[in-house]
Amino acid sequence: MSTTKRSARKCSTSIASKIRKKLDSSDVHSDSKTKKIPKGNEKQSIKLSNDPNTSQVKQIKETTIYSATKAFDYTFYNRPCEELARALLGKKLVRLSDKGERLCGTIVETEAYLGHPDKGAHSYKGKTNKNEAMFLEPGTAYVYHIHSYCCMNISSKGDGAAVLLRALEPVENIPSMIKLRQKRTPGKTFKSHELCNGPSKLCLSLDVTKDQINKEDMTKSTKIWMENGDEIKPDRIVHCKRINISYAEEWVDKPLRYYIQGNKCVSKLDKEAEKAM
C-alpha cells in the first residue's frame, strides 16, 4: 500500500473510532435538558431537540444515516481491482439526494482499470490532480467529466486502480430518476432499463456529480455508499473486453469488463464472450 493510502487509512480509522464512541453514548440537548442516548437508539436522538439545526442533532443525524445503511466497510474494497469489479456485481449503489430520498440501483456491469501498466487507465502515467482519487483509500469515489457528462469509479487495492460503474438496474425511487434524466432531455420518456444502462446515464439518474461525489469515502459517506444485494454466481458473469478504449494499444482486448448475463440493463452485450462461457 502506498504512503498516501496508509496515511489516509490511519486518519479514517481515527475518525471512525470517534464516531463509534459518539454512537455508544451521545449527549443530546433539548432546551435546558440533557438526555443520554444508549447505543442502538440513535434514531430517537433526532427528535429530542426543538431546533433541528443544532450542531448536536446534525452530527448525530449524519452518523445515524450512515450506521443505518449497513454500508460496506474498508475490507470489502481492499482487494485487487479485477476481484472488486466482479464482487460489485449484484450489490446496491445508494445515493441520498439533497431531499433525503434514496436513489438506488443494483450494479450489473463494471470495468476494471488496473493503474500502471494498464494503458486504458487514467492513472497509467501516474498521479495527477484530476485522477488523485484513484490513488486514495480503497472505497473512494472517483468521478470525472467526459463530454459534459460524469462517470463514476470506485478505488480498489493497488495504486491508481479503480472500478468503473458501467450500468445499474434501477431499484428505488425510479420516478425521481426519470425526472433527473429529463433535466437533460425535457419531455423524453424513459423505460426503467434505459435509465442507467451506461456510465454517464447512471450518474445522471442518481445525481452523481464531480463537485459532490468525487473523493467521497464510501465507507463513511452520508451521500453515497454500497449496500448488500444479490450474490452473483461466477457462471453468470460475462468476462469481455472494455468499451471505447481504442487508445489502449495491447490493453484493448483484455477481458476486464464484467456483466451479469441476461440482465437487460447492461449497456452492451458481447455475444462472442457469452458463447464462450
Image: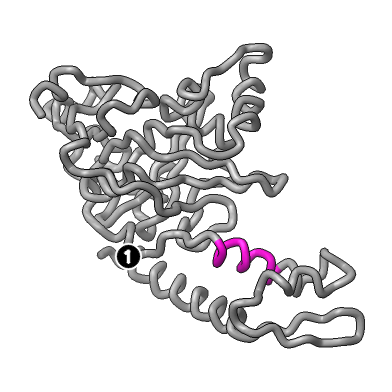
Q: Which secondary structure, mark 1?
A: helix
Q: Residue at x 58, y 84 (%)?
A: 24
Q: Is residue 154 above or below residue 26?
A: above
Q: Is residue 123 above or below residue 146?
A: below
Report the front residue among 153 and 274.
274
- Quadrant of the rendered structure where residue 240 is? top left
| Residues rendered magenta in the picture | 59-68
Q: Seen in the image, is 187 located left or right of residue 228?
A: right
Image quadrant in which the N terminus is located: bottom left
Residue 254 visible in rendering: yes
- Quadrant of the rendered structure where residue 259 is? top left
* Badge count: 1
Residue on which disc 1 sits: 75
- Residue 182 in percent (x, y) is at 64, 20
- Residue 187 in percent (x, y) is at 67, 12
On whether residue 67 falls in the magenta region, the answer is yes
Kindly give the residue lying farthest to the left in the view shown: 276
Magenta span: chief secondary structure: helix
> Which amino acid does the dot numbered 1 rest on?
Thr
- Residue 7 in percent (x, y) is at 38, 71
